[in-house]
């Protein structure tokens, strides 16, 4: 149950994270126009940079709203509003000025932890509390005299009351927690390039659980004072250093994983090459162009876990190399071509095109190493599975998703077995009555990259970046 809840949290975090490309586009174009003056020499550049900064600077608020919406039943707007209320209550009550007044001391003497209270962690916590309040109070009916405040109107009120109590707790807990986070971040930072490599390694290992978002928040956002993404895009940092927790992902996502996809295609069974090609080509292109790697990673993550471990090690090595030579580039969403192109002329970008040369090297390493390991140990990568699955024929256009959704839904057990269906960026998240009634072979026949069981009655079907279209078609089926 705990793991399932944490995975839902990870999914909810993807909603606000998906907003970051807008900041990347705006700031990237602005810095491209005026790479040295940062907007001082061009009103247009200044306008774009400030517009992008308005998103980057308010990531904690986006997290509060996004998590509240994603974790609440029915994903209602009142939950999102409550997330904002929760964040505002906490950050106001625990602001430096308020704490100074409560403690009767000068503002300068307040613990510096309270100066960082408006961070991603508090944003996520605010969203969680707001979602819990929505799930508990959105259907409560008050006496007639107070009927106006019944139901969904009661949610923000109870959220505000709850966050007052949470703020009292944080008043005592946050300073040591903040100190621990800073110590952890500083410990990794002191390791320099090796620390960046360790971060990259564990980042990939946590992908299956969705807990990599928690690790990312320490290094990418302003939880422990590192704020690698925010500082890189705002130009506040050290050239060649800021961005070290992002740069090494570009050679992996743009080149390494496509190399792995090519290796898996070349080692696929002859009669399954066409089937494997359709999956691996789309997944490889998504990794290169957008940095969305889940479709490709899930295609071999559970089929060949040892191969995925190798992928995690290579990711760590890539981050170590990039950090060692001070090659930096950044992303607003993920380490794909779009973000690389937009960030390459940012003030803190340092020899970013060396990452392309590094990427070509990693393309070769991934291709030859994956091909050797797959053949040597007969790993069951896409196209090498046992011949026990009959593959459906995809229909053109929208009919393709209709056919795919119908087959997946039938494989899940249909109305008799499916309790709920949700989706994140690349996955269908399904709750079923009985996992034994799920026909995995039928689901697999749709050419999805993979699927996994979560807890006693959950299953995730990895579809890829077209998951929304499949989810919409399943929603239509469930309404009939």
Image: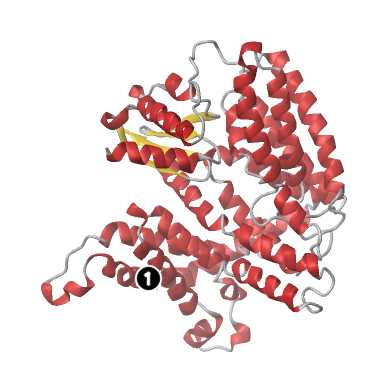
470 sits to left or right of 197: left
Q: Is residue 243 visible?
A: no
- Is 21 situated above or below 317? below
Q: How many marks?
A: 1
Q: Residue at x 75, y 35 (%)?
A: 256
Secondary structure of the residue carrying tag 1 is helix
Residue placed most toward the observer, 112 or 468: 468
Q: Is residue 304 left or right of residue 404?
A: right
Q: How does the figure colour the protein chain or chains? A: secondary structure
Q: Quadrant of residue 313?
A: top right
Q: Is residue 371 above or below residue 246?
A: above
On-image quarter of the C terminus: top left
Q: Residues within 10 Å of mark 1 (few under 14, many from 20)?
A: few
Q: Extreme front residue here? A: 396
Q: Position of 217 compared to 197: left or right?
A: left
Q: Quadrant of the N terminus?
A: top left
Pinpoint residue 130: horizontal percent, then vertical percent.
38, 63
Furthest toward the left, the residue is: 144
| Relative to 471, 268 lies left or right | right
| Rendered residue at 61%/84% (across/down) | 109
Residue drawn at the location 48% of the way across and 79% of the way down: 92
Pick the residue in front: 265 or 101: 265
Q: In this figure, which residue is indicated by the disc labeled 1?
A: 165
Instruction: State the image coordinates of residue 361 (x, y, percent, origin top left).
Output: 85, 35
Relative vertical location of residue 125 with respect to residue 148 in this rendering, above or below: above
Q: At which x and y percent is residue 288?
A: 71, 41
Q: Residue at x 36, y 32 (%)?
A: 456
Confirm whether residue 126 shows in the render.
yes
Q: Depth check: 224 or 302 in front?
A: 302
Can you give x and y, in whole percent of width and height, for residue 148 in the image? 20, 74
């Amino acid at each position: 149950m705990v793991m399932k809840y944490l995975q839902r949290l990870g999914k909810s975090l993807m909603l606000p994270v998906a907003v970051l490309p807008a900041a990347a586009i705006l700031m990237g174009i602005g810095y491209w126009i005026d790479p040295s003056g940062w907007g001082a020499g061009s009103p247009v550049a200044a306008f774009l940079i400030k517009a992008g900064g308005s998103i980057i600077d308010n990531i904690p608020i986006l997290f509060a709203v996004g998590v509240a919406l994603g974790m609440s039943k029915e994903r209602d707007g009142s939950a999102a509003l409550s997330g904002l209320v929760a964040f505002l209550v906490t950050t106001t009550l625990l602001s430096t000025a308020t704490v100074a007044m409560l403690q009767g001391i000068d503002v300068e003497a307040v613990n510096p932890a309270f100066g960082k209270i408006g961070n991603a962690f508090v944003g996520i916590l605010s969203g969680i509390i707001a979602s819990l309040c929505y799930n508990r109070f959105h259907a409560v009916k008050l006496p007639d005299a107070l009927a106006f405040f019944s139901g969904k109107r009661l949610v923000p009120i109870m959220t505000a009351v709850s966050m007052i109590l949470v703020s009292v707790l944080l008043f005592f807990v946050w300073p040591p927690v903040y100190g621990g986070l800073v110590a952890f971040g500083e410990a990794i930072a002191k390791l320099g390039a090796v620390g960046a490599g360790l971060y990259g390694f564990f980042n990939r290992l946590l992908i299956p659980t969705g807990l990599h978002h928690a690790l990312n928040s320490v290094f990418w956002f302003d939880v422990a004072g590192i704020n690698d993404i925010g500082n890189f895009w705002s130009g506040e940092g050290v050239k060649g250093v800021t961005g070290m927790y992002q740069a090494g992902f570009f050679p992996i996502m743009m080149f390494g994983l496509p190399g792995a996809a090519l290796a898996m295609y070349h080692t696929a069974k002859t009669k399954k090459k066409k089937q494997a090609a359709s999956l691996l080509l789309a997944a490889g292109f998504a990794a290169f162009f957008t940095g969305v790697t889940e479709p490709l990673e899930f295609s071999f993550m559970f089929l060949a876990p040892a191969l995925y471990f190798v992928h995690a090690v290579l990711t760590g090595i890539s981050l170590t190399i990039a950090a060692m030579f001070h090659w930096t580039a950044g992303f607003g969403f993920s380490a794909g071509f779009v973000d690389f192109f937009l960030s390459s002329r940012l003030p803190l970008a340092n020899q970013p095109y060396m990452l392309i040369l590094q990427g070509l090297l990693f393309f070769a390493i991934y291709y030859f190493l994956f091909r050797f390991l797959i053949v040597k140990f007969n790993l069951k990568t896409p196209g090498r599975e046992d011949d026990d699955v009959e593959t459906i024929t995809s229909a053109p256009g929208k009919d393709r998703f209709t056919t795919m959704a119908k087959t997946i839904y039938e494989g899940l057990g249909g109305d008799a077995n499916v309790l709920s269906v949700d989706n994140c960026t690349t996955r269908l998240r399904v709750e079923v009555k009985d996992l034994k009634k799920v026909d995995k072979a039928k689901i697999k026949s749709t050419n999805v990259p993979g699927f996994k069981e979560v807890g006693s009655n959950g299953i995730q079907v990895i579809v890829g970046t077209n998951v929304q279209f499949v989810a919409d078609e399943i929603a239509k089926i469930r309404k009939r």
